[in-house]
Image (cartoon, rainbow, N blue to C red):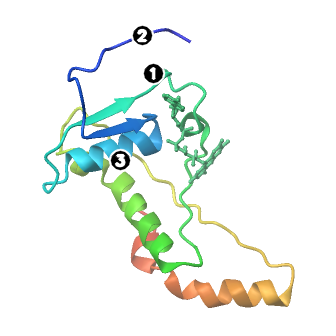
Amino acid sequence: MPQTFEAPKRPSYDVVIVGGAMYGSSVAWFLANNLDFDGSVLVVERDPTYEFTSTAHTNSCMRQQFSQEINVRISQFAADYVKNFRSFMGNDPRVPEVTLQNFGYMYLADNEAFARVLKKFRKFRSPAVLAPST
Ligand SMILES: Cc1cc2nc3c(=O)[nH]c(=O)nc-3n(C[C@H](O)[C@H](O)[C@H](O)COP(=O)(O)OP(=O)(O)OC[C@H]3O[C@@H](n4cnc5c(N)ncnc54)[C@H](O)[C@@H]3O)c2cc1C
């Protein structure tokens, strides 16, 4: 692992995020872009290569079926965010267009009770978001 070190530019920060992979960077970005937040943010990362992170190993699949509506909505937002990544980055031409491939998830139930659970929570699906992109 290459050792790089960049000292924090301030003596203190309002928010310190430990870990700059998927979650840490995301929290930092959304916080920094929140008009209601005018504080300072420091992201502390021990491995700038991100080689050993879960983020670097993910299959990058975004399932959208959950039992709680809030989780479905979070996942739908994530899909929209990835689909329109350049737009979220201020239409910077250096930001690549991200290709989303819509395969869908298949959920299988091996008993009636679980099948009822899957049917019950199917109502949270949003065809508008799940429709394949062009
Ligand atoms: C093989 C695999 C496949 C996956 N597939 C999917 C998928 O298809 N869909 C999906 O939604 N999720 C998937 N996941 C889960 C997903 O990758 C993780 O939930 C997500 O990447 C977690 O992101 P994170 O930023 O919290 O953690 P990580 O990516 O692990 O990042 C943690 C960061 O914190 C840093 N860190 C830790 N401790 C310290 C410290 N003390 N000081 C400084 N820095 C520190 C690490 O160096 C690292 O950069 C998969 C995971 C794996 C392993």
Q: Quadrant of the C terminus?
A: bottom left
Instruction: Report whether 54 appears left or right of 26.
Output: right
Q: Is residue 43 above or below residue 77?
A: above
Secondary element at image label 1? loop
Q: Position of residue 24 (x, y in %)?
A: 41, 41
Secondary element at image label 3? helix
Residue assigned mark 2:
4
Residue assigned mark 1:
48
Could you give the CA–CA distance between mark 3 and mark 2, rounded to whole angstroms?
23 Å
Could you give the CA–CA distance between mark 3 and mark 1, rounded to whole angstroms?
17 Å
Return the residue found at the far right: 111
Q: Is residue 134 visible?
A: no
Ligand 1 is found in which quarter of the picture?
Answer: top right
Residue assigned mark 3:
27
What residue is at 86 percent from the left and 79 percent from the top? 110
Task: State the residue in front, 21 or 13.
Answer: 13
Return the residue found at the far front: 11
Q: Earlier in the sequence, mark 2 or mark 1?
A: 2
Q: Amino acid at mark 3?
A: Val
Q: Residues within 10 Å of mark 2 (few under 14, many from 20)?
A: few
Q: Position of residue 126 (x, y in %)?
A: 45, 79
Decide: marks 2, 1 in contact (CB < 8 A)? yes
